[in-house]
Amino acid sequence: MVFLTLAALNKPDNLVFNVGYTIVGFIIDHWGKDQLLELIKNGGEVYSTFGLTEKEFERQWERYVKDKFWIL
């Protein structure tokens, strides 16, 4: 199974509305609400907000989704 990338969610097909809540939950569970606000203030810049590359962020988000929603 190929997991979504942040770049795929930025396309104008509204896919982000189907899974965006999982990103918000992941960020709040791992870094808290303040860091979610920082991400918004930083224009979605993952590295400057969390110190992770987009690939590292995506891997951690994927693991979170699979663990939380029991996806193998």
Image (spheres, grey):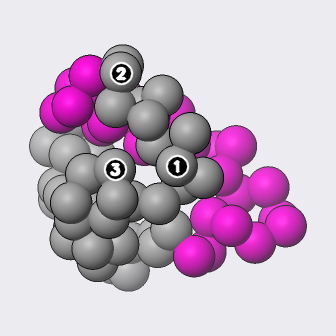
Mark positioned earlier in the residue sequence (2 or 1):
2
Residue that lies at the very extreme toward the top in this rendered image? 33
Location of residue 57 with respect to 7 vertically, above or below? above
Q: Determine crowd level at label 1: few under 14, some 14-19, many 20+ residues with C-alpha closer than 10 A.
A: few
> Which residue position is annotated with label 3?
49
Q: How many marks?
A: 3
Whether the residues at callouts 1 and 3 have beta carbons within 8 Å, the answer is yes
> Which residue position is annotated with label 2?
34
Q: Determine crowd level at label 3: few under 14, some 14-19, many 20+ residues with C-alpha closer than 10 A.
A: some
Q: Quadrant of the C terminus?
A: bottom left
For residue 31, which quarter of the picture?
Answer: top left
Mark positioned earlier in the residue sequence (1 or 3):
1
Q: Position of residue 6 (x, y in %)?
A: 51, 68
Q: Position of residue 18 (x, y in %)?
A: 64, 45
Q: Is residue 70 visible?
A: no
| C-alpha span from label 2 to label 3 | 11 Å
Residue found 34% across the figure and 50% down from its top: 49
